[in-house]
Amino acid sequence: MVHELLTRVASFPRRDGHYRVMGFDAPAIAESVRAGQFVNLLLRPGPLLRRPFSVYRTMPDGTVEIIYRPVGEGTALLAGMQIGEPVSVLGPLGRPFEFDPAWGSVALVSGGLGVAPMWLAARDARAAGLRVTWVHGARTSAELSLEWVGDEIVFATDDGSRGFHGSAVAAVPDGVGAVLACGPNRMLAAVAARWPDAQVAVETYMGCGTGVCLGCAVPLRAGGYDRACKEGPVYRAADVDWEALPSHLHYGVGA
Amino acid sequence: MVHELLTRVASFPRRDGHYRVMGFDAPAIAESVRAGQFVNLLLRPGPLLRRPFSVYRTMPDGTVEIIYRPVGEGTALLAGMQIGEPVSVLGPLGRPFEFDPAWGSVALVSGGLGVAPMWLAARDARAAGLRVTWVHGARTSAELSLEWVGDEIVFATDDGSRGFHGSAVAAVPDGVGAVLACGPNRMLAAVAARWPDAQVAVETYMGCGTGVCLGCAVPLRAGGYDRACKEGPVYRAADVDWEALPSHLHYGVGA
Amino acid sequence: MAVDAGGLRLRGPVIAASGTFGYGTEVPLLERRALGAIVSKGIFLRPRPGNPPPRIVETPSGMLNAIGLQGPGVEALIRDYCPRWAEWDFPVLVNINGESADEYGELAARLDGVPGVAGFEINVSCPNVEQGGMYFGNDPRAAAEVTAAVRRRTRLPIWVKLTPMVSDIAVIARACESAGADGLSAINTFVGMSIDLHTFRPRLSFRTGGLSGPAIRPLAVHLAHQAARAVRIPVIGVGGIVSAEDALEFLVAGCAAVQVGTATFADPRAIARVHDGIAAFLEASGLSSLAELPRYLPRD
Amino acid sequence: MAVDAGGLRLRGPVIAASGTFGYGTEVPLLERRALGAIVSKGIFLRPRPGNPPPRIVETPSGMLNAIGLQGPGVEALIRDYCPRWAEWDFPVLVNINGESADEYGELAARLDGVPGVAGFEINVSCPNVEQGGMYFGNDPRAAAEVTAAVRRRTRLPIWVKLTPMVSDIAVIARACESAGADGLSAINTFVGMSIDLHTFRPRLSFRTGGLSGPAIRPLAVHLAHQAARAVRIPVIGVGGIVSAEDALEFLVAGCAAVQVGTATFADPRAIARVHDGIAAFLEASGLSSLAELPRYLPRD
Ligand SMILES: Cc1cc2nc3c(=O)[nH]c(=O)nc-3n(C[C@H](O)[C@H](O)[C@H](O)COP(=O)(O)OP(=O)(O)OC[C@H]3O[C@@H](n4cnc5c(N)ncnc54)[C@H](O)[C@@H]3O)c2cc1C
Ligand SMILES: Cc1cc2nc3c(=O)[nH]c(=O)nc-3n(C[C@H](O)[C@H](O)[C@H](O)COP(=O)(O)OP(=O)(O)OC[C@H]3O[C@@H](n4cnc5c(N)ncnc54)[C@H](O)[C@@H]3O)c2cc1C
Ligand SMILES: Cc1cc2nc3c(=O)[nH]c(=O)nc-3n(C[C@H](O)[C@H](O)[C@H](O)COP(=O)(O)O)c2cc1C
Ligand SMILES: Cc1cc2nc3c(=O)[nH]c(=O)nc-3n(C[C@H](O)[C@H](O)[C@H](O)COP(=O)(O)O)c2cc1C
Ligand code: FES
Ligand code: FES
């Protein structure tokens, strides 16, 4: 069930590499949110529309965390907010990742900011009894997110400054039972090529986040479009027409 | 000379009755501003246009203070600002009050928020060797500004809850050498009727505060309009066509 | 708070604007009690995929959209949504679209009498489709033709959704009135463009989009006022309404009711907020009904 | 950063918009170096008092103004301002206004040859005067007539300031081009209205006003683009420019130069900021001049 909580900033922006992590007091969402789902934040004063953010982590005290980088109007405002300042949090929204104990193991593949949904994904994967291999890539070591959970971590950098020299996709070990990925669409297209059945979380412009505006169109291989905020943001990799899906966000990752 | 200072909030909003007093670090303005002049504040994030505020007090440390009441978008933002938050201060702007030692004494007449320019007026009057009678009125005692300087204070309330029972204009003792007034236009019209040569500070909507937009038109007895931000905001009371000058602000005073 | 809005008696003056409320089934936290009516997302006879992404871009106090009237077509509408509408305690109007006057007429004929369909809003003002749409809206003869074509095929109330992209909206308004419209919705979005400085091309795949939101409110109030002065049928004001005060500007300017669109995206409860705020304003002003609200409406 | 803008070679692409920069003598903290040109406040043959207050009201990301072309008349302009313009190192164009084509022509004739007058911007789009103004702007024949009347009386460059209140700006643009305009300024303000809920009447004494500021930018970019596609003469983009990125949207969309208006009210240094920001963008993009800026301009 979707909640709209008029709540407050619960924790100061914490730095994780060159990302910021920020918490909101939102118990009703914290207890029901699943990996891959997002919250839609309204800032006043601020831009006309809400800004969607994947739920990064949840805390036992009911805090919902997001991870972001200041790139524009909304994120600049977030970065300047103090503990206790008001914000409206709408969520949880969207279709979450699915987990199947039969997989045995799962690889969580993230490029740059694509790390956002992976903390919850690791949590839910382990709850399903899966072995979690966390694969995280960025352009360079300075842009890696260093917070991780799971059984195994593989870092990858385009410039080889840390871990595997190349893309996160290329760094995924063989033999994992399933793949979950989030990152720039170019990277997700590569995921689709290697693992058609992978689950990927996509990102589009969103007008409402609730399914009414049709602004978040995701072009499908089968033809036509559906809504990243309702049928998505999680898709079977091979179902998306990647050539036709623009990527806006600056993920800090090459391929 | 006009300065545009990208500066910061220097002091927390102080309460004065139901008004707020707020300081900005603006030495260049503090040392040159004269009574009746105003500063034009730009708030970001905030409304498109600047908001003009009479300079209330100046401090030796270069702080420029304004006094206001939260009535709308800009003043609500001001009321929520913390020490150190940035603000652009443009000023000093407008034509100040003039003082003539030959007057011997002067009455400073303010209705509600019209008290704004009077602190500096008292300062400049005494610098000119004048005896200062400070006459301040409001609807009721709770809405009086209680900060004052001068040789004599006369409070007036429409409901008689404190001091003179009636308007500030009616409360002015006879025999003062000159009258300076600020308040709702209805009150200033009454001032004009009693003291045609009084100097009054008017208030209009302002687009720029610098004389380019012609948005601040003040209708003149002699016909035509001029600019509250350039030729004003201080006028000879009898020169203004009061019937044709709308009043927007909520001064918290009847007549 | 009941109002007469173009052939329909509504329990309240606040209506959900077409394309911003889906088919009435999507919005979360919906407070039905506050809904005067819903206008459905625009529909064509046949299914339409809509435009490729990006379809929206935010602008100062507004947004551009070029959805392209994505929709399932009239048969799916009748099958999947009308039955639910029939159970609701407020009317649903269908926003109808076509590439010719005949297509509009056909759509109306097909939907006329279907349980759940309370009336029609003729969209002669969509800026986001290649054919039809706005073309009908800025030519009085074409607008009248479409209105008449629908009028011939249904007895249900007809509102015509006007485009702001005209030099004199009064002319179009009168043309629709004489052609049999029961009400006018003023206005649809303004055509706008935003350029991406990374690609040196328009941000929207459709190149242009329709501007909505608070940015256009002063323009919408003016145009709705111009329309209201020109005709006797009710005018429904739409454009940039976020608060009750915004809605009241349209009502004072001569509108019988209002539609809330983009505001719902940021606040799913916007319509209830506006509805309750209008009630509170009337009470605070000592007015016992909307009929007593002072209007500013010098007649042409 | 030099550009050719309708018969004038400007040292930079950023121009002060008419009515937002006075006569070039009022703005404090003026940084002359960044000014490509100034367009003066609109002038009539005779002095005009302008409209009673309130003349302006703020709206979301914009403002409505109904100044009413207050001005000293042409003789005072020649006496008090032209001599100072003659000393400046950038051109000043006079924004001319009239109630008939002849009046526009007379004004041009009177100012032609006066030292300090570098050209004319014909305002056929002022929404804030009872006669003249916009009427000329939304009728192609009238717009052409006014342009021709001015053309007959001067050899100086002529820009025509277009109104957005038309259903097809390309038609007006072509009419002005064939009548002898050297450039087009697109666009003037949109007509809007705001209602005061205390008085139940319009906030502006003139009832309606012209909407300017960031709110209208996406509409202005679209209209300037439509005009640029329709004609061969340079189009000067104007409407809602606050930042260099905003200005670049107009330039990429096919404009030869831009005008900055309302932004100057909040930031007296806006023009210098925009000018320097464009230079920085070109450098960062590895472009050695504006001529190398990629344009998005499919021809009609
Ligand atoms: C399902 C979903 C989950 C997301 N999760 C995260 C997250 O976990 N962390 C995070 O930082 N961001 C996330 N985003 C993107 C986020 O919603 C903001 O768009 C982004 O943070 C920039 O917002 P802004 O206001 O700072 O930038 P703006 O001022 O809006 O624009 C700055 C730049 O961001 C781009 N942009 C603006 N809006 C969007 C949008 N809706 N989608 C993509 N790009 C946009 C613009 O093209 C521009 O280049 C997510 C988006 C979606 C749809
Ligand atoms: C020369 C001058 C000196 C001023 N000095 C002071 C001062 O010392 N203290 C103070 O509190 N205010 C002063 N004002 C008014 C101030 O500029 C603001 O307009 C006022 O504080 C409301 O701003 P806001 O953004 O909060 O309200 P808004 O959101 O702008 O509007 C809220 C209400 O304020 C009214 N309002 C908005 N703008 C203006 C304006 N420019 N002039 C008058 N009314 C307006 C509106 O009609 C509305 O009813 C002065 C104005 C001028 C022209
Ligand atoms: C995403 C979106 C989709 C829209 N779809 C339609 C539509 O299908 N038919 C229609 O007549 N108007 C449509 N509109 C226009 C709105 O109904 C309304 O007229 C316009 O948005 C102005 O109102 P607002 O500022 O409150 O949104 C749409 C608007 C938006 C933002
Ligand atoms: C206060 C004000 C006065 C204006 N006066 C004139 C004028 O005299 N002549 C004219 O052609 N345009 C005039 N304009 C329109 C501007 O030149 C410009 O076209 C419009 O404001 C849009 O640009 P902007 O959004 O950058 O302000 C005026 C605009 C404002 C805000
Ligand atoms: S964001 Fe509005 S439908 Fe998906
Ligand atoms: S406020 Fe612009 S001229 Fe006075």
Image (spheres, coloured by chain):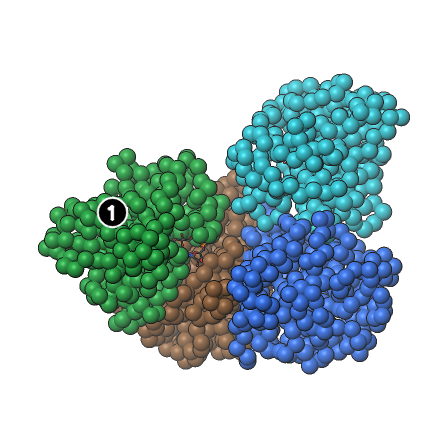
Chain colours: A green, B cyan, C brown, D blue
Element under disc 1: helix
On the image, the x and y values in percent for residue A226 come to 31, 65
Q: Residue at x 60, y 74 (%)?
A: D228
On the image, the x and y values in percent for residue D29 come to 71, 49
The answer to whether residue B94 is left or right of residue D167 is right
Callout 1: residue from which chain?
A
Q: Specify the farthest residue to the front.
A: A161
Find disc 1 in the rendering and name its residue. A120
Q: Which of the two residues, B151 or D286, is positioned nearer the viewer here?
A: D286
The number of callouts visible is 1
Vertical comparison of C111 with A187: above or below? below
At label 1, the amino acid type is Leu
Q: Which of the two residues, D21 or C99, is positioned nearer the viewer here?
A: D21
The answer to whether residue B240 is left or right of residue C291 is right
Q: Give the quarter of the image for residue B68.
A: top right
Q: Residue at x 37, y 49 (%)?
A: A142
